[in-house]
Amino acid sequence: MSESQKVTKQPALTTASGAIWLVVGGIISLLCLVLLWLMRGLEPIGAATTGIVIIVVAYLAMIAVRYGVSSLRVRLWTLAALTIGIAITFLTVAVITVYGA
């Protein structure tokens, strides 16, 4: 019996509790925050700090969604989107910093 390989049928987006998204999001956030902290003094000044604030707010939103949203599918898709948003925020700030320097 084969399992569907469709993204929309994966357990992480259909039946998980959401705790794994908090762990993955926390690890990604921690790595991004450390790197952004080290980039604070680079031009343009304030870009890294803005990225730090956005990532912290996104992770806090992940915690709120995990424990505040009862609809399983909505919760998991929102957690996935916020995790991707954290990574995109870091990449955006990093590119801005590279081109700004």
Image (cartoon, grey):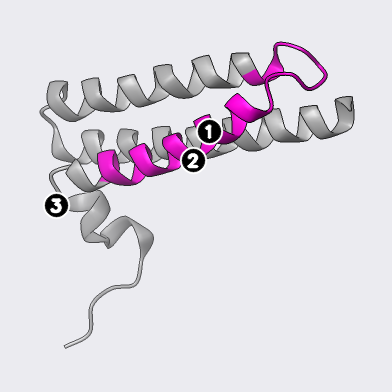
Quickly name the residue at label 2. 31
Residue 71 in percent (x, y) is at 14, 32
**Which amino acid, by three-letter code, is at mark 3?**
Thr
Left or right: residue 95 compared with residue 63 = right
In front of the other: 31 or 78:
31
Residue located 51% across and 14% down the image: 53
Q: Position of residue 14 (x, y in %)?
A: 20, 51
Give me the C-alpha separation between circle 3 and circle 2. Answer: 27 Å
Residue farthest toward the top in the current orientation of the protein: 46
Question: What residue span does the magenta drawing correspond to?
Answer: 21-48
Residue 15's disc number: 3
| Residue contact at pointers 2 and 1, CB within 8 angstroms | yes
User: Amino acid type of disc 1?
Assistant: Val
Disc 3 or disc 2, which is closer to the eye?
2
Report the magenta stretch's main SS: helix
| Residue 29 falls inside the magenta stretch | yes
What secondary structure is found at the residue carrying circle 3?
Answer: loop
